[in-house]
């Protein structure tokens, strides 16, 4: 656990970057610092591994004040990922990843085999180990950055806007990768971003900071969206708070109808305005309207229990039928969520 | 004062303008010619070669390679080898210095033009600039700061290099050094070094001034 | 052409203290001595100033001023001031002129390293010395070597000119030949110096090849098979 105990950073010219910050980043969770530029989020992060020293207050790592630990020793025990990855251009990827193990005096062979293992773990081809950073794309470099931070298996990971320099598609895949990795590794992660959507997606807890380095709110994403502490947080969260909150509403146990599907080619007696045509092995083909029997209309799918209400609603809005197609892990249709069923679930969500 | 050796100022006063060849003023004039001609000629030759290297990329590597080698040649043996072609004239000094200047300026022109952002080039094309007008009105002005930075290096080093020419009798103010060595006497050396450094500083200052006048946007950007 | 055959064909030019081998060795000795002394001063100073960021202005001003200093003038000045009893009066200006290119390029090289890289290095727990030695120097190496190469060009040229003030080396053939109208000596010596300068260039290029990481020079390398 990382504890901020009334931490203040004041620069010689009087600027206060962080103002009496007190919070905890629990072990095994992702705590996100988010806020506009000038809110002191990066400064706060960098005070944890003493890249910057706090002026007042204490930062504790599992109860031990970091100020008492020699910076290089402290930092070797904390993974650090930054925006441009900061890979060493003169070293091969495998040696970049093994930087901290080398520093800790690991046997060279052991360090390299650990590096190769991590390369695969972050989703890269092991053949890339023998390349140099300039031969990799931005997204690949960022993955190597994460692997490098994990090399010595530190319990704590500090990530300073690690995904903000890559394009949106790569960013999404890096975020998903981090969620997947964290499920396996259970690190204590402090993650800095200016992107509230990223904060909500990744954070177990989100700390919203305001300019001048004061904590505006610390909460789990769902609470943050439903109960913003004040106007600043509300404005920072932006529009669509309600819609975005649906990401945290489960589709577990949603009422599904199974009588609206017809197998391709078979005649259908049911007198319903919309029916879902499926293949013989239950893959969805499209919706057919009673008014235009010959035409297949578009459909959207979601996985009940796995996907959120937001995905279910999105699937419903993609189709003129207004219904969402529920599928299992293999993509086979298990039922249909009608407008009525969605309505019920939404009402429940609004109440809860 | 009496009959002792003349002081520095006395020596300057006595030798400034004797009306004969070899007065300080005379040497200063020679020095200016032998350093200015290579600077100007170097620029005039480097511009088309640099432009060609940008237009035809394959040209750059060999051109840069050849000039890198030339730049590495010590001036004195080059002067000596040239004597058989140009004789003991100012040209013997001017020609090698021109080549050294080109060695610095060609990469400067290429880098300068390389610094023109692609979107600027594209929008100039889109607005209907002909290639020549685009070059003169858009690309060259943007390349100017880099070229001028190269020109500053060239100006200062040309001015100091001319003095080596004194060893073949064509050194401008450098002649003061050989004169001082043959007839051991300090004032000419001091005057020679001082005037050459002063000349270099003046040239450098003028180029800085030119940079401000030619590229006002560079300073405006820095101020904001 | 006949000058060349006269010069290189004369057996007298190949032996004794004023023969080609001896002069070549002298030229190499003086140049190497000056370059090494300049390196000993300029590399640590450049690393220090680049790493700490203090004193950068000093470097820039010194470098500009040094470029303006006429080599011949400095040589004559020191010889007149200190006499010709030792080679010291000649070595001093040689070193003085060799320092600025190394100093400036080392400083610029270290200072120019991407701040993100420095940040990442410190963030992973490298000490100040390790950051300099394991990250900044390897990344700045092309510029540091450029400084050394420019300095070597300068030293080889100045050593040639220094023959005028009595120093040995290949410049002697040229200076003495010019004074005695021995044009075979002038041309032969000049050719030797030019060749010497070219060899020095090639040596530096090879050193650069061998020491700069392909990741820094971005030379395309084909990964060796079966070594993953």
Image (cartoon, coloured by chain):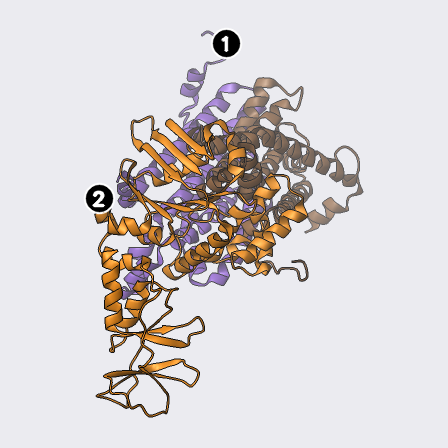
Chain colours: A orange, B purple, C brown
Which residue is label 2 attached to? Answer: A232
* Front position in the image: A91 or A40: A40
Q: Quadrant of residue B74?
A: top right
Q: Could you tell me which chain the residue with mark 2 belongs to?
A: A
Residue B54 in sight from this viewpoint: yes
Residue shown at 52% from the left, 51% from the top: A147
Q: Which mark is residue B179?
A: none
Q: Is residue B48 above or below residue B89?
A: below
Residue shown at 59% from the left, 55% from the top: A117
**Which quadrant holds the C terminus of chain C?**
bottom right
Q: Which mark is residue B4?
A: 1
Disc 2 from disc 1: Cα separation: 87 Å
- Which element carries disc 1, helix, strand or loop? loop
Residue shown at 57% from the left, 40% from the top: C134
Q: Could you tell me which chain the residue with mark 1 belongs to?
A: B
* Front position in the image: B113 or A118: A118
- Which element carries disc 2, helix, strand or loop? helix
Q: Quadrant of residue B49?
A: bottom left
Q: How many marks?
A: 2
Closer mark to the observer between disc 2 and disc 1: 2
């Amino acid at each position: 656990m990382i504890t901020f105990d009334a931490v203040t950073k004041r620069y010689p010219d009087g600027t206060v970057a962080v103002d009496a910050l007190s919070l905890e980043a629990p072990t095994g969770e992702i705590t996100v610092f988010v806020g506009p530029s000038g809110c002191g989020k990066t400064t706060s992060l960098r005070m944890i591994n003493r890249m910057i020293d706090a002026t007042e207050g204490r930062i504790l790592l599992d109860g031990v004040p970091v100020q008492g630990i020699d910076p290089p020793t402290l930092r070797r025990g904390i993974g650090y990922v930054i925006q441009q990855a900061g890979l060493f251009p003169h070293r091969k990827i495998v040696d970049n990843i093994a930087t901290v193990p080398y520093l800790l005096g690991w046997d060279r062979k052991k360090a390299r085999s650990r590096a190769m293992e991590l390369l695969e773990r972050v989703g890269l081809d092991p053949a890339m180990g023998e390349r140099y950073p300039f031969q990799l794309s931005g997204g690949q470099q960022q993955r190597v950055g994460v692997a490098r931070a994990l090399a010595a298996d530190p319990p704590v990971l500090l990530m300073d806007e690690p995904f903000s320099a890559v394009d949106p598609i790569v960013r999404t895949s890096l975020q998903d990768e981090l969620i997947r990795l964290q499920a396996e590794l259970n690190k204590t992660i402090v993650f800095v971003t200016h992107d509230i959507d990223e904060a909500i997606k990744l954070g177990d807890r989100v700390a919203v900071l305001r300019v001048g380095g004061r904590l505006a709110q610390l909460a789990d994403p769902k609470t943050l969206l439903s109960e913003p502490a004040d106007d600043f947080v509300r404005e920072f969260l932006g529009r669509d708070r309600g819609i975005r909150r649906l990401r945290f509403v489960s589709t577990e146990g949603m009422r599904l109808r199974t009588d609206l599907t017809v197998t391709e080619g078979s005649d259908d007696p049911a007198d319903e305005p919309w029916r879902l045509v499926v293949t013989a092995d239950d893959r969805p083909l499209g919706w057919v309207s009673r008014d235009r029997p010959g035409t297949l209309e578009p459909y959207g799918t979601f996985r009940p229990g796995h996907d959120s209400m937001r995905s279910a609603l999105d699937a419903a809005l993609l189709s003129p039928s207004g219904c969402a197609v529920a599928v299992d892990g293999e993509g086979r249709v298990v039922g249909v969520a009608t407008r009525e069923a969605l309505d019920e679930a939404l009402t429940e969500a609004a109440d809860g | 004062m009496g009959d002792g050796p003349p002081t520095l100022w006395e020596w300057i006063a006595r030798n400034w303008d004797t009306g004969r060849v070899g007065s300080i003023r005379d040497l200063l004039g020679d020095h200016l010619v032998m350093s200015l001609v290579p600077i100007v000629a170097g620029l005039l030759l480097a511009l088309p070669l640099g432009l060609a290297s940008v237009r035809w990329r394959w040209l750059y590597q060999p051109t840069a390679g050849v000039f890198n080698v030339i730049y590495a040649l010590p001036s004195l043996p080059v002067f000596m080898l040239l004597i058989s072609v140009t004789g003991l004239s100012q040209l013997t000094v001017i020609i090698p210095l021109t080549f050294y200047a080109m060695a610095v300026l060609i990469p400067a022109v290429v880098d300068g033009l390389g610094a023109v952002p692609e979107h600027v080039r594209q929008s100039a094309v889109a607005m209907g600039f002909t290639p020549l007008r685009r070059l003169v009105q858009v690309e060259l002005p943007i390349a100017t700061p880099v070229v001028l930075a190269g020109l500053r290096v060239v100006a200062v080093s040309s001015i100091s290099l001319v003095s080596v020419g004194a060893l073949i009798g064509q050194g401008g103010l450098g002649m003061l050094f050989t004169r001082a060595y043959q007839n051991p006497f300090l004032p000419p050396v001091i005057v020679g070094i001082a005037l050459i450094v002063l000349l270099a500083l003046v040239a450098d200052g003028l180029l800085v001034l030119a940079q401000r006048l030619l590229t006002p946007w560079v300073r405006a950007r820095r101020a904001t | 052409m006949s000058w060349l055959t006269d010069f290189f064909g004369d057996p007298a030019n190949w032996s004794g203290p004023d023969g080609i081998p001896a002069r070549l060795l002298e030229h190499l000795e003086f140049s190497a001595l000056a370059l090494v002394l300049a390196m000993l001063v300029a590399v640590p100073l450049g690393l220090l100033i680049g790493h700490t960021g203090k004193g950068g202005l000093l470097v820039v001003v010194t470098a500009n001023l040094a470029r303006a200093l006429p080599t011949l003038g400095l040589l004559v000045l020191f010889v007149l001031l200190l006499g010709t009893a030792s080679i010291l009066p000649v070595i001093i200006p040689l070193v003085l002129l060799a320092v600025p290119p190394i100093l400036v390029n080392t400083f610029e090289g270290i200072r120019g390293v991407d701040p993100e890289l420095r940040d990442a290095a410190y963030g992973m727990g490298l000490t100040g010395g390790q950051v300099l030695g394991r990250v900044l120097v390897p990344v700045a190496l092309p510029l540091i070597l450029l400084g050394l190469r420019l300095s070597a060009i300068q030293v080889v040229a100045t050593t040639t000119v220094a023959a005028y003030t009595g120093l040995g080396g290949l410049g002697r053939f040229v200076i003495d030949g010019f004074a005695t109208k021995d044009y075979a000596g002038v041309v032969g010596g000049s050719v030797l110096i030019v060749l010497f300068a070219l060899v020095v260039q090639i040596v530096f290029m090879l050193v650069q090849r061998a020491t700069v990481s392909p990741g820094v020079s971005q030379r395309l390398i084909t990964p060796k098979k079966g070594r993953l």
